[in-house]
Image (tube, coloured by chain):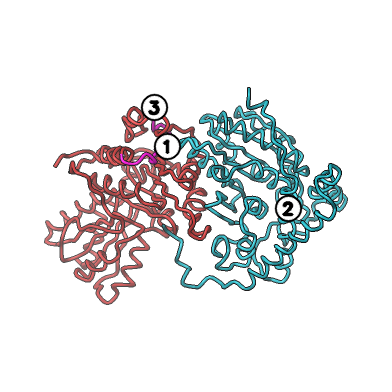
Chain colours: A red, B cyan
C-alpha cells in the first residue's frame, strides 16, 4: 500500500470528491492561488478552476456564512479555515445557522457543508494560534464532528463528510499534515461514529482522538515495557460518538484513561469520562482519569508549551495510578 | 447600459393591495392572539412596513429567485405566498406550522417557495443570503436573491463582509436595508456615523439608493431596477428603504423612545391607504372592490386563527426529529 502524508490524504479526498460531484466547491483564505496556507489544496485551482476553488478575503464570518448559504441552496461546499483559531470569528454562523437551520425549518433544509482545517496546538505559535477547540463544536446538536489521526482516516472521513447531508466539522492538525501512513489506491470511505482499536490490550483502556493518538500509543508502548498491557482506542468521530467501543473495552479492562489535549473544563474528554463513569460503573476498579491539556493559555516557550500538553509521561503516569502501581 | 434603460412593467395594483392588506390583517390577528397568550415569546410585528416586502418581492420569480430575511419575517413570508394558515399555526407552535412548530415567529421557512427564513441573530442571514447567490451564479440559474435586514444590522461585520464578497464575485443579490429608524429602542441616528445608509454600498463598489418605503410603487420600481441589474450583469444592489413600524420592537416594547406625533405622521402616509388612494384616483379599483379585498383579507386571517387553534401540537416524539438529515 502506498504511504502518503496526511496532507496528501486530505487533498486526495477533496480531489476525488470534486471530480465525482460538480456541486463540491472549496473556499477559504489562500486556498486557490497560494495553493493553501499549509499546501493542502495544492493543485486544485489548476485542476478545477476559480469557480470551484475560491480565494476569499479574510472575512471568516462572511465566507463561513456564504458556505452555509450555498449549501442551503444545494451546493456541497468545503470551507477551509486556515486554522480553527480563526473559526471563532465565524462561530455565530456555525452555531446559529449551520447547526440549527434544519431544525428551525422543521426539517425542510439540508446543509451539506464541510468545515475543515488545522485544530489543536502546534509549535511555537503562542496562545492565539495554538488551542484545541473541539469542545465548542462537539457541544452543538446539528453538527457532526470528526477528528482523524492518520492519513487513512483523514481521507476516508473527509470523503464521508463531503457526501454527508449535514454540516460536518473536520478537525485536522498542523503537525499531523506531515505524518505519513498507508492509504490504498482504491476508493474507500470511513463511516462516522466508528472508533477503532489501535492496540489491543487487557489491563487498561486508553481513549483518545486526533494528534494525541501518537503520544497515547507511545505511552502504551512504555507501559508494555513495564508489563502493563494497554488497549488504545481512537474515537475518530466525536459526534456521533462510538460509545459502545469504549464501554466494551472498559468492561474488559476495568480501567479507563481519557486523553484530550484541550482544556479540562467542559471538554470532550471530561464528557467521555463522565459517560464511562456512568455506564461502566459496576466494571470500574479505579476512577476514570482525564489527561487534558493544562488549564492555561498556550505559552510560547517550547519547554512550557510541551508541559502544557499531554505527554507519554502524564498518560503513562495516569495509567499507573489507575492500576495502583 | 440596456438594462438600466429597461422600462419596468407596471405592477398589479390589486395584487399589491391584497398582499399588504393580508399582512396587516394577519398581524392584527396575531397581535390579538398574543394578548390571549395563544402565542408566546417574541412577536415582532411588521405593521407599517408592508410596502417594503410587498413591493420588493412582487418583482421576483420565486421559481428561480430567493428571499432571505431577519426575525421580523411575517410580511416577507406572506409576500412569498406562504399559506397564512401555516404561518399562524407556526406562531401558535403547532405541528401544522410552516416550520412544524420548531421555528416560531422568527423562523418562518418554506424551502419549496424559496423563502429561506427567518433569522433571529441580527445580520447573521446576510452571509447566508450571499451564499445562496453564489450557488445561483455557479449553477448559472439566472436567479436573484433579495436579502432583507434592518437598520440595526447594518453595523454588523456580516453586512460589510458580505457586500465586499458579493462585489468581488459579482453575485446576483440585492441587499435591502429596511430602515424603520429604531434598532429596538435606539434611534439609528444615534449609532450610525452616516445618516444616509445608501452610501454604505459605495465602499464596496455597489450602487446604493434611498427609497421611500411607505410607497409600494416606488419600492417596486426601485427594487425591480436593482434586481434587473443583478440578474443581467451580476451587479449586486443595495437599497436603503425608509420605513416605519407602528408597533413596538416586539410585543413587550411600549416604544417610549419616540413621540406619538411621530407615529401619527407616518400613519398619515400609511402604505395601504396611499396605494388605495392612487388606485381609486386612477380608477384601477372601486371603493366596493377595496372593501371586498379587505373583507377577504380579514376572513383569511380569521381562518388562519381557526386553523391554528384547531391544529395539534407537535408530538413530544418529534423533539429529536429534524436535528440531522
Where residue B247 sits: x, y (%)?
76, 56
Of B89 and B41, nearer the camera is B89
Front position in the image: B87 or B158: B87
Q: In which quarter of the image is residue A78?
A: top left
Task: Return the residue found at the far bottom.
Answer: A282
Q: In which quarter of the image is the N terminus of chain A?
A: top left
Any magenta on residue A21? yes
Frontmost of labels 3 and 2 is 2
Q: Mark 1 points at which residue?
A: A27
Disc 2 is attached to a residue of which chain? Answer: B
Residue nearer the viewer, A235 or B260: B260
Q: Is mark 3 on a helix, strand or loop?
A: loop
**Vertical comparison of A220 with B158: above or below:** below
List the residue tagged with mark 2. Answer: B18
Report whether A172 appears left or right of A150.
right
Query: Dividing the picture into quarters, in which one does residue B167 lie?
Result: top right
Label 1: few (<14), some (14–19) or many (≥20) C-alpha neighbours in 10 Å: many
Badge 3 crowding class, 10 Å Cα cut-off, few under 14, some 14 to 19, many 20 or more, is some
**According to the image, label 3 marks what residue?**
A33
In the image, taking residue A246 as reference, residue B105 lies left or right, namely: right
Chain holding disc 3: A
Gap between marks 1 and 3 measured at Cα: 12 Å
Q: Which of marks 1 and 3 is nearer the N terminus?
A: 1
Relative height, residue A116 to residue B202 (above, below)? below
Q: Position of residue B211 (x, y in %)?
A: 74, 37
Q: Do labels 3 and 2 share a chain?
A: no
Please give the chain letter of the residue carrying mark 1.
Answer: A
Which residues are drawn in magenta? Answer: A20-32
Amino acid at each position: 500500500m502506498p504511504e502518503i502524508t496526511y496532507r496528501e490524504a486530505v487533498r486526495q479526498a477533496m480531489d476525488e470528491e470534486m471530480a465525482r460531484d460538480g456541486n463540491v466547491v472549496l473556499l477559504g483564505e489562500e486556498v486557490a492561488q497560494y495553493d493553501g496556507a499549509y499546501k493542502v489544496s495544492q493543485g486544485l485551482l489548476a485542476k478545477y478552476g476559480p469557480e470551484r476553488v475560491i480565494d476569499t478575503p479574510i472575512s471568516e464570518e462572511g465566507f463561513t456564512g456564504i458556505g452555509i448559504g450555498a449549501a442551503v441552496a444545494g451546493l456541497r461546499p468545503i470551507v477551509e479555515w486556515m486554522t480553527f483559531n480563526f473559526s471563532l470569528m465565524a462561530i455565530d454562523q456555525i452555531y446559529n445557522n449551520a447547526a440549527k437551520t434544519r431544525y428551525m425549518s422543521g426539517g425542510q433544509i439540508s446543509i451539506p457543508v464541510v468545515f475543515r482545517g488545522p485544530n489543536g496546538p502546534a509549535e511555537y505559535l503562542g496562545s492565539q494560534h495554538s488551542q484545541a477547540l473541539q469542545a465548542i463544536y462537539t457541544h452543538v446538536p446539528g453538527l457532526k464532528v470528526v477528528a482523524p489521526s492518520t492519513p487513512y482516516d483523514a481521507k476516508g472521513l473527509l470523503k464521508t463528510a463531503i457526501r454527508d447531508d449535514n454540516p460536518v466539522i473536520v478537525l485536522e492538525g498542523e503537525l499531523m499534515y506531515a505524518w505519513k501512513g498507508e492509504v490504498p489506491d482504491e476508493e474507500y470511505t470511513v463511516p462516522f461514529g466508528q472508533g477503532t482499536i489501535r492496540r489491543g490490550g487487557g489491563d487498561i483502556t486508553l481513549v483518545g482522538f486526533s494528534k494525541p493518538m501518537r503520544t497515547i500509543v507511545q505511552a502504551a508502548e512504555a507501559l508494555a515495557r513495564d508489563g502493563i498491557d494497554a488497549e488504545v482506542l481512537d474515537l475518530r468521530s466525536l459526534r456521533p460518538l462510538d460509545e459502545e467501543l469504549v464501554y466494551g473495552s472498559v468492561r474488559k479492562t476495568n480501567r479507563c484513561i481519557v486523553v484530550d489535549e484541550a482544556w479540562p473544563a467542559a471538554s470532550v474528554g471530561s464528557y467521555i469520562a463522565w459517560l464511562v463513569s456512568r455506564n461502566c460503573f459496576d466494571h470500574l476498579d479505579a476512577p476514570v482519569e482525564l489527561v487534558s491539556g493544562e488549564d492555561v493559555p498556550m505559552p510560547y516557550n517550547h519547554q512550557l508549551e510541551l508541559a502544557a500538553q499531554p505527554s507519554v509521561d502524564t498518560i503513562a503516569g495516569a495509567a499507573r495510578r489507575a492500576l495502583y502501581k | 447600459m440596456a438594462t438600466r434603460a429597461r422600462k419596468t412593467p407596471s405592477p398589479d395594483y390589486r395584487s399589491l393591495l391584497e398582499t399588504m392588506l393580508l399582512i396587516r390583517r394577519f398581524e392584527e390577528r396575531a397581535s390579538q392572539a398574543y394578548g390571549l397568550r395563544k402565542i408566546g415569546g417574541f412577536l415582532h410585528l411588521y405593521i407599517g412596513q408592508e410596502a417594503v416586502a410587498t413591493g420588493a418581492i412582487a418583482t421576483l420569480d420565486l421559481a428561480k429567485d430567493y428571499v432571505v430575511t431577519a426575525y421580523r419575517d411575517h410580511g416577507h413570508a406572506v409576500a412569498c405566498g406562504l399559506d397564512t394558515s401555516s404561518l399562524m399555526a407556526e406562531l401558535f407552535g403547532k405541528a401544522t406550522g410552516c416550520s412544524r412548530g420548531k421555528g416560531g415567529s422568527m423562523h418562518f421557512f418554506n424551502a419549496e417557495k424559496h423563502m429561506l427564513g427567518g433569522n433571529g441573530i441580527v445580520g447573521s442571514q446576510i452571509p447566508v443570503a450571499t451564499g445562496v447567490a453564489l450557488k445561483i451564479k455557479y449553477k448559472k440559474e439566472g436567479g436573484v436573491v433579495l436579502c432583507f435586514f434592518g437598520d440595526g444590522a447594518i453595523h454588523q461585520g456580516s453586512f460589510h463582509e458580505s457586500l465586499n464578497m458579493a462585489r468581488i464575485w459579482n453575485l446576483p443579490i440585492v441587499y435591502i436595508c429596511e430602515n424603520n429608524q429604531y434598532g429596538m429602542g435606539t434611534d439609528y441616528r444615534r449609532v450610525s456615523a452616516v445618516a444616509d445608509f445608501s452610501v454604505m454600498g459605495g465602499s464596496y463598489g455597489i450602487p446604493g439608493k434611498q427609497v421611500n418605503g411607505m410607497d409600494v410603487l416606488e419600492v417596486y420600481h426601485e427594487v425591480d431596477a436593482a434586481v434587473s441589474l443583478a440578474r443581467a450583469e451580476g451587479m449586486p444592489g443595495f437599497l436603503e428603504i425608509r420605513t416605519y413600524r407602528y408597533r413596538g420592537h416586539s410585543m413587550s416594547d411600549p416604544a417610549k423612545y419616540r413621540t406619538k406625533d411621530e407615529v401619527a405622521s407616518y400613519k398619515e402616509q400609511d402604505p395601504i391607504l396611499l396605494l388605495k388612494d392612487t388606485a381609486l384616483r386612477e380608477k384601477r379599483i372601486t371603493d366596493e372592490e377595496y372593501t371586498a379585498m379587505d373583507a377577504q383579507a380579514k376572513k383569511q386571517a380569521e381562518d388562519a386563527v381557526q386553523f391554528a387553534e384547531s391544529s395539534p401540537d407537535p408530538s413530544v416524539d418529534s423533539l429529536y426529529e429534524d436535528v440531522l438529515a
